[in-house]
Image (spheres, grey):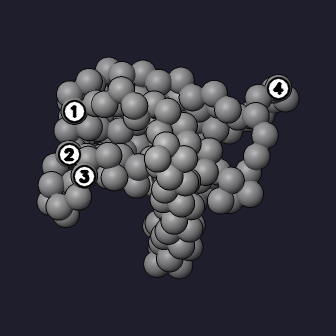
Amino acid sequence: MTVFFDLREKLYYEQHWEELLEIVIDTALRSEGITGEYELSFSFVSEDEIQELNRDYRGKDSVTDVLSFPVDQEFEMDVESLGDIVICLPRAKEQAEEIAHALEDEVIYLTIHSVMHLLGYDHETEEDKTEMRAAEKKALHEVQNAKDKKKSNRI
């Protein structure tokens, strides 16, 4: 697995997140039965940048927390490219504070949410939303188990 990190917004960013998010991404993919070599890009951006991306690519001129850009591979490659994940850290921090949990937990959830979008899940209809939320919940549970296992190995 290769994750290309682009830290265009470093406000609130923590260095250990790169390793953690690689685990989150890998675990979320494995929860969906996806193994093998793959790559994706992961960017942390400002509110201005995510608003611009949201406007240009989705026609919504507003700040959002996360955007996903899946890749449609039309040719054979040695490594499957899944696409791009873009997270707005200031917005993620606001949301974490609103629901009274850690920013790291919010970033983990947004990463899982975005991975599911890269895999084709959506939440446009109630049926799609229910299916996507179930996949997210399964991945989140497996990520928590992986974090707990890693923590117990350090003790």
Q: Residue at x 31, y 31 (%)?
A: 14
Q: On screen, 37 above or below 134?
A: above
Distance in Å between CA atoms under marks 1 and 3: 11 Å
Distance in Å between CA atoms under marks 2 and 3: 8 Å
Instruction: Please state which amino acid type lies under the numbered disc 3.
Output: Ala
* Residue at the spot of label 4: 78
Secondary structure type for disc 4: loop
- The mark lying in front, picked from 2 and 3, is 3
Instruction: Residue 52: tell me if it is visible.
Output: no
Q: Is residue 131 left or right of residue 62?
A: right
Residue 106: x %, y % from top left: 32, 52
Residue 98: x %, y % from top left: 14, 60
N-terminal-most mark, 2 or 1: 1
Q: Residue at x 78, y 40 (%)?
A: 36
Q: Are marks 1 and 4 in contact (CB under 8 Å)?
A: no
Relative depth, front residue between 57 and 81: 81
